[in-house]
Image: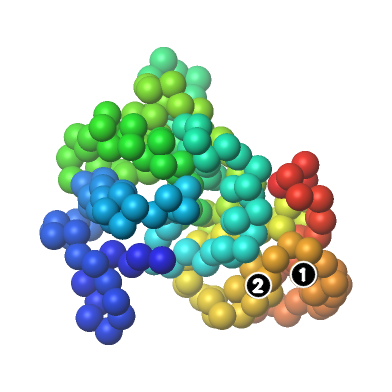
Amino acid sequence: LVIFGTDGSIPTISTGLPNVPTGHCAKTLKILQLSLQDIERRQRQDIRWLMLVDDDTLLSVPRLSVLLSCYNHSELIYLGERYGYRLHAADGFNYHTGGAGIAFSLPLLRLLLQRCSCPAPAAPDDMILGYCLQALGVAALHAPQLHQARPQDYAAELLQQLPPPISFHKFQLTTPEYTYQRWLNGSLAANHSRIQAAAAAPVNDSQLESCSRTQTKRCTDL
């Protein structure tokens, strides 16, 4: 776990770049570059993936590990919650939304840093990455377990049909600790009984949440 920022109260790494109000493309590429340099400098051959998340993203690492085990880390893997921009136009493209979290295999990360650049420091980072990777022939693989918004922003019926969640994004009008414990805590197998009980529990109006069903199959249901 590496946190990039300037908060002196927690261990962080500065990118050395000025903050911008939107987009953050230059800063995101710098974060990816510094992360890869650190992995290679320390010769961490046990690190196979890089997961890029916002500072207000909640993430289940055990569930993420299960999901990533379904993919070949030696291939060009670009995994996240897929969005589309002008998909029916000639210049349309797929991209993964940054708030939900984006997983890169290290071979893809190296290719990205060699071939992709920002048109402006404040360009939308996730969209620029998606545009560049599509131009390089890399598919945007969709993971329905990753979520750009809060649990209460989704229809309960939708969440009940999806695999157990791996991430949610944004803290407004939520208690992050509660959201994590209810939706993301523990591995898939260990949480079978807990999630079933949570799904059956009543939900008050302030929570507006519903637990998704448990699926115990490893990759076929992910």
Question: At label 2, which amino acid type do we have?
Answer: Asn
Helix, strand, or loop for circle 1? loop
Residue 86 at what x, y percent from top left? Answer: 44, 27
Residue 134 at what x, y percent from top left? Answer: 42, 25
- Please indicate whether residue 170 sits to the left or right of residue 36 in the image: right
Residue 178 at what x, y percent from top left? Answer: 61, 80
In the displayed image of the protein, which residue is found farthest to the bottom?
A: 9
Q: Nearer the viewer, residue 42 or 205?
A: 42
* Figure check: 20 above or below 205: above
Helix, strand, or loop for circle 2? loop
Question: At label 1, which amino acid type do we have?
Answer: Asn
Which quadrant of the figure contains the N terminus?
bottom left
The answer, for residue 199, to whether it is visible in the render is no
Residue that badge 1 annotates: 191
* Figure check: 142 above or below 36: above
Residue that badge 2 annotates: 185
**Label 2 close to label 1 by CB (< 8 Å):** yes
Residue lying at 27% horizontally and 72% vertically, measured from the top left: 12
Residue 43 at what x, y percent from top left? Answer: 34, 53
